[in-house]
Image (cartoon, rainbow, N blue to C red):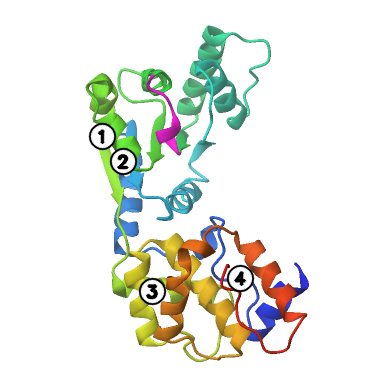
Amino acid sequence: MIECDKRFLEYYGLTELPFGVTPDPRFLYLGAKHREALSALVYGTETNRGFLALIARPGMGKTSLLFQYLEGLRNQARTAFLFQRVGDSRDFMKYLMADLNLDSAGKDLPEMHGALNQFLIQEKLEGRRVIIVIDEAQNLGEELLEFIRLLSNFETPHAKLMQIVIAGQPQLAERLAKASMAQLRQRISFIIRLEQFDREEATAYIDHRLNVAGYKGRPLFTIGARLSIAEHSEGIPRNINSICFNAMSLAWALKKQVIDRDMIQEIVADFDLRSLLGTQEVMVLKCEQESKRNIWQVPRLL
């Protein structure tokens, strides 16, 4: 942790940053729509539907939700999580087998298929499901998506041997809607959409993340600030994180104990330029300025 991070945490009485940029299941807030999406994933798995799809705009907490889904299956299933894998079908099979702790060394594609089939049968005999989650699937070409569809053919006369979840941004839904993807679309039992937070959920999300990070003081954001955050973030968790982090940084710089609507408006006015820099870059620049003067403003180009 850099010294500036430490001073930031001490100022707010935090144990860690509440509005980070990495998906951490501890910070996952399950609003009504997130709970519905998670329930649909679990139900589709319990009823052995074979193929599910999860669609969400960027920043909606899709990956964290998938981690939560897999965590709930830890003692019941063998799982693989594939993220932004590129390449052809052979590369995909190698990644898949590696995640399942299967040896693919020296095997061609038919041999890997055979090894995977034997593995699936053995897991079925031992009463375990096999769950494959493919995140950011909007980046996969149609040929590879078709290959993944064919993997769902692993089955017995009575049940699918493997549950597949493909997750991605709205471009994935657009791709699935194409005529050329009709066979894959027909295999998908549920297309689950993750929707944005409403105002109440946005407020609860802010409180949840602050609580997880150890905040115990009086309300940090005024009601007006919270309404402004909900409006300008469009209910997207990643946007809420960005606005809240920058607002807290501004309040820290100005030695303010409460963040009001005007401060949020100031942050939002500069938001497009702030987004050009990552969180750590913002913090480093703030530290550099703090070392030069005792009372300072957040740089306008953050």
Question: What is the distance, in whole Å, between disc 1 and disc 3 at their CAs?
Answer: 36 Å
* Category of crowding for the residue at label 1, using alpha-carbon neighbours closer than 10 angstroms: few (below 14), some (14–19), many (at least 20): some
Residue 90 locus on image (x, y percent): 54, 16
Q: Which residue is mark 1?
A: 189
State how many labels appear. 4
Question: What is the distance, in whole Å, between disc 1 and disc 2 at their CAs?
Answer: 8 Å
Rendered residue at 53%/30% (across/down): 85
Q: Which residue is mark 2?
A: 44
Q: Nearer the viewer, mark 4 or mark 1?
A: 4
Q: Is residue 277 above or below residue 54?
A: below
- Asked whether disc 1 touches disc 2, contact meaning CB atoms under 8 Å apart, the reply is yes
In the picture, the disc for residue 17 is 4
Residue 140 sits inside the magenta stretch: yes
Give left or right: position of 6 versus 246.
right
Question: What is the distance, in whole Å, between disc 2 and disc 4 at their CAs?
Answer: 35 Å
Under mark 3, the amino acid is Ile
* Category of crowding for the residue at label 3, using alpha-carbon neighbours closer than 10 angstroms: few (below 14), some (14–19), many (at least 20): many
Residue 223 locus on image (x, y percent): 36, 86
Q: Which residues are magenta?
A: 136-142
Q: Which residue is mark 3?
A: 229
Give left or right: position of 175 versus 161.
left
